[in-house]
Amino acid sequence: MDANLNKNGRGSWNSRLAFVLAAAGSAVGLGNIWGFPTVTAQHGGGGFVLLYLACILLVALPVMLAEMVIGRAGEKNPVGALKHLKPGTPWYLVGALGVITGLIILSFYTVIAGWTVYYFIQAMGGALTVPPGAEDSAAYFAGMFRDMIANPGYEILFVAVFMIATTAIVAVGIQKGIERSIKIMMPLLFLLLAFLIFRSVTLEGAGAGIRFYLIPDLTAITPGVIVLALGQAFFSLSLGMGVMITYGSYLSKDECLPSSAGYVVATDSLIAICAGLIVFPVIFFMISAHGADLNDLVATGAGLVFVIFPQILTELPGGTAATLVFGSAFFLLLAIAALTSAISILEVVTAHLVDDWKIPRKRAAWGAGTVIFILAIPSALSHGAVGWLSEGGWFGISFFDLLYILTFRFFLPIGALGLALFVGWVWGLEKASEEIRTGTPAFRLERLWHLMIRYIAPVAITIILIAQIVDVFGG
Ligand code: PHE
């Protein structure tokens, strides 16, 4: 038998480490390295960090474990797993929502990922230095970004490059594709991160940045900010659409699920916090060097990473060489983080096609990859390349933002709520615990987990969803 396949003829992880790395690779993405520092800066710094950690512990961690349990017990993608565990009921629709959410998320995620590839190439080629005689660096980099996003050719080309890389890995399978690539990319990601943190925290003005970032200011916490923190927690941990169900379905029965979930959550949170340690010193370096205003610097997420960051790179002590090394490392870090996340999303869709539609893996992956590429085109063109797709056009907000809000604020929380209710009330805590106990005979936090998945998580998510609806439709 092919070593790549387990007894069901499906793939399997070679070791627990492989599973934890792959799940952490899914979780650690643009949401951590770009999203987390940006929303933290926009919402008061340290207070937001504290709130985020509370959401992670109280809601996200229990849901993460629930997804892994469903996956390992159901031995399938989200649709197949729910059908298997509760046959003849409509609960599989929660899984179907997950697959659809995956298609949508990946269609806009690849656009940003494509930008990171473009900037990595620019950085490597030394193009992130302001040529002599050019206007000032702010105008120069704003121009570079504008040229990229307004150019349909670039936008589509880099989405294609990124989607081909993602699909090529998923098409090969669990051990030979995902596992093998993750085992190279994750250590590289940790190394790049360590290098970048070291460079950042030794910058002038770093102390002020770190203080703003890590000392909580509780006055900045409002109900709106709590809603955002939970949304960020789900997105960052890849929860609510069945990534952990799918990855969990390739696990063997003797693995310990609670500690795996703990490792994944800890890695993800740690990397989000570390990303702040790169970004905040850099922001405050800019503030101390130019008297720039924090709110201006972080007003748009895209601007922070693709305009402000390159600007700061040119001012690093060490001249052009420093710009080249630090710039390439930063954009490579972003591209790798995005790739390991994109792989997990495509795997959900692919697993669904393989398990439930009996389509061979290669054909399923390339088919899904092609569909996502086509779906990505309007998002790619919605940053100015095509007016009516862009902000202020026919949609009022850009097509990209529309998809982002729909999934980040609604589909992921609805999916997570569905999965929590499924485990807490429908499939049943007894069965879930039994599944956990096959690999963890002494599951010590069992009662606490029951309480959280049955009551705390559903209530918290429902409140957040109502708040979102009021916020989006109420005024
Ligand atoms: N967790 C990823 C990030 O932080 C994004 C993601 C969301 C991946 C949902 C999979 C599913 O960027």
Image (tube, helix red, strand yellow):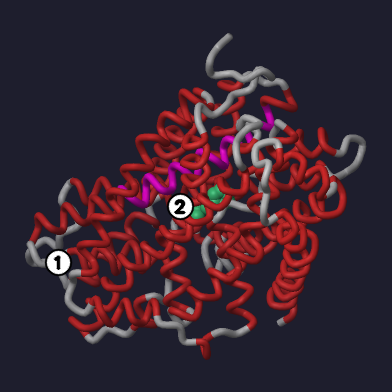
Q: Which residue is mark 2?
A: 29
Residue sticking out furthest to the front: 442
Q: Which residue appears at 51% of the width and 30% of the height?
A: 170
Q: Which residue appears at 65% of the width and 37% of the height?
A: 439
Q: Which residue appears at 57% of the width and 58% of the height?
A: 235
28 with respect to 312 (left or right):
right
Give the amino acid type for the residue marked by disc 1 in the picture: Leu
Q: Nearer the viewer, residue 106 or 178?
A: 178
Q: Is residue 419 above or below residue 186?
A: below
The answer to whether residue 361 is magenta is no
Magenta segment: 332-353
Decide if residue 350 is in sight here. Answer: no
Which one is earlier in the sequence, the residue at label 2 or at label 1? 2
Q: Nearer the viewer, residue 143 or 179?
A: 179
Q: Main secondary structure of the magenta part?
A: helix
Ligand 1 near label 2 (Cβ, under 8 Å)? Answer: yes
Q: Residue 56's x, y, as percent?
A: 58, 64
The answer to whether residue 346 is magenta is yes
Q: Nearer the viewer, residue 293 or 216?
A: 216
Q: Are marks 2 and 1 in contact (CB under 8 Å)?
A: no
- Which quarter of the rendered picture does the C terminus lie within? bottom right
Task: Give the numbered dot on residue 316.
Answer: 1
- Which quarter of the rendered picture does the N terminus lie within? top right
